[in-house]
Amino acid sequence: MIRKMMPLIIVLLLLMPLNVKAASEWNQAVTVYGAGLENNQELLDATSEILGVMEEDKIEYVRSGDVEKYLGVTYDDSVLKSSIRILQKDEGQGLDITVDESMGQITKITEETYKNALLTSGITDAEVVIGAAEDVTGESALSGIYKAYEAQGEEIDPERTQNAQDELEAISDIAEENSNVEGFSQEQLNKMITEIKIQVIEAGGNLSEGEIRNIVGEELEANGLNGVLEQDQIDRITVIIMNIQDSGLFQSEEAQRLLDSSKNLIDDITSSEGFQDAKDSAQELGKDIQESGAWESFKNAVSDFFKAIVDFFRSLF
């Protein structure tokens, strides 16, 4: 009976009103080059090819002052070479990120890590290409994305961009610190942090430190990282989640879009080759990594839906 009703349930859930502010699609993409390319035409042309820059794109450069403004870190203009092209999409289109490494490697940050950081900053619906014509760490690319929004007259919350940078740095640092640790992968870490966000949002987005630590502990176990991460690394993740919660993101108008995009990110991670390799390695160590919490979330949504129906009819009598 439930199986037969499932299509109807899905339709009804999709039709339920959401309290979110619609994002508007830009009529032109924005390309933001690193300032280190401004006087190097060869690298500029190669980067333009990587990003797929169009003649009608709005062109900007991200400079050291922008990096300090958005991320709270300082770089010399000459080292800013990772560049981006972005087009804001209508609400519900999701966040599509491509890291093009056909000419230069992004050595420190994965596609999933970029996506996690952008979701934390409140960017949930956009097409983004990130690339460089020579090897770079890729740490400054986020600044280019924020500069693009500024160029289009869109406001970016500096508290959220700082939280996003803190998250990106934490993931990168923890990945580097555990690069030779058996049973660790950056895919597991990204999945764990994303699922923590999902749980906090679904629990109301206003949890105590103890409740957040409990969720972190559950996700450590679910992702095969219990006993792998050090306590100071766990504490760092916990503080980041608390700071994101304090920014109001988990209870804001964007919370539903963040929730949807985070679940899409989980699907992207669990379908990646890196995650499957991590899952195989975990099994060899006698551990297990859960594929996804999406089914459990769906069951909870269905349960809540039926509860709402029952409560409605009870209110009539």
Image: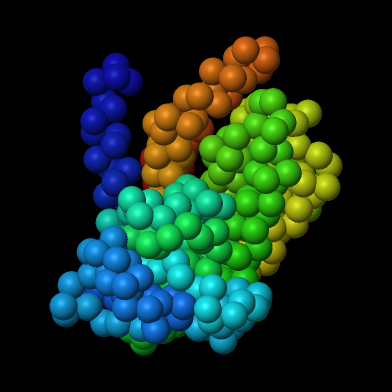
Give me the residue at 27% from left, 49% from top: 15
Q: Quadrant of residue 60?
A: bottom left
At 29% across and 34% down in the image, what residue appears? 9
Residue 299 at least partly seen: no
Residue 120 position, x and y percent, is 53, 61
Q: Where in the figure is residue 8, as x and y percent of width and height? A: 24, 33
Query: Which residue is rendered at x = 63% and y = 50% of the image?
Result: 171
Q: State the residue in front, 260 or 9.
A: 260
68 relative position to 106: left or right: right
Q: Nearer the viewer, residue 57 or 19?
A: 57
The answer to whether residue 283 is seen in the rendering is yes
Q: How far from the left and from the top, in percent, is residue 129?
A: 33, 60
Please name the residue shown 46% across and 70% down the image. Answer: 81
Residue 158 vs residue 97: left or right?
Answer: right
**Left/right of residue 34 with respect to residue 77 in the rendered view:** left
Question: Of residues 15 and 105, which is closer to you in this image?
Answer: 105
Position of residue 110 relative to residue 1, above or below, is below
